[in-house]
Image (tube, helix red, strand yellow):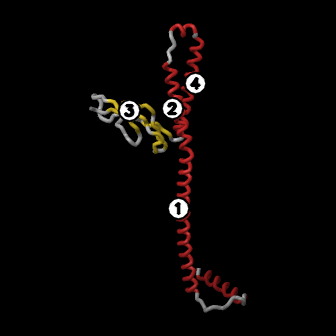
Amino acid sequence: MASDKETLLAAFERFLAANPQVEAGPAVGPAQVLVELTALRIETQKLGRTLNDLLEREQADRAARLQSIERERLRPVLLDLIELRDRLEAGIEALARLRPTWLTRLMCRRKGLRFQAVLAGFKLILLRLDQQLAALGVEAIEAQDRPFDPVTMRAAEVVCLRRLPEAQVVGVLRRGWRWRGEVLKVAEVRVNKRG
């Protein structure tokens, strides 16, 4: 290793002798060159760490900005999908409650079969919409028979039932939704209040 250093220093001295345009400075020994190189190495390492920290902070800030933009742009679309889903579910429930008279059923058997096929199709659409919402991280807020939570629920109606505990949800009027842990739409509920 010592011979490598000596060879390197000899090559450097030949370079300086061959290039007269370089001004001759004070004589520097190998120890001084080693000290200067060590100082430069330490300074370069510090600069590298600083740049690495800056890069990591910038990447984290960029990821946070992208997530914020995604939330900002996706939120209205999700709310529209949820509204569509709720209306489709209400339509399915209304169709399921329709009960034609026995005479209508007897005379319109084919129409009844078509009606059942349409109802089954609507249920499949609702199932697919639920799957897509779940894939996007949207989940329904469970409220029925739970204690009232003002963060995720809004009391639309108050009832007085003595047999049930105070502030228990006794009915869900409109389902609430959560997206990635954030309340997207509060549930509208019927709450019990004693006395």
In the picture of the structure, the residue carrying the numbered disc 1 is 57
**What residue is drawn where x is 30% and y is 35%?**
166
Q: Amino acid at mark 3?
A: Glu
**What residue is drawn where x is 54% and y is 65%?**
54
Residue 53's x, y, as percent?
Answer: 52, 65
Q: Amino acid at mark 1?
A: Arg
Labels 3 & 1 near each other (Cβ < 8 A)? no
User: Which disc number belongs to residue 86?
Assistant: 2
User: Which disc number belongs to residue 121?
Assistant: 4
Residue 39's x, y, as percent?
Answer: 54, 79
From mark 2 to mark 1, how far is it between C-alphas?
Answer: 42 Å
From mark 2 to mark 4, how far is it between C-alphas?
Answer: 16 Å
Instruction: Name the front one of labels 3 and 1.
Output: 3
Dot 4 or dot 3: first in sequence order is 4
Dot 4 or dot 1: first in sequence order is 1
Q: Amino acid at mark 2?
A: Asp
Dot 3 or dot 1: first in sequence order is 1
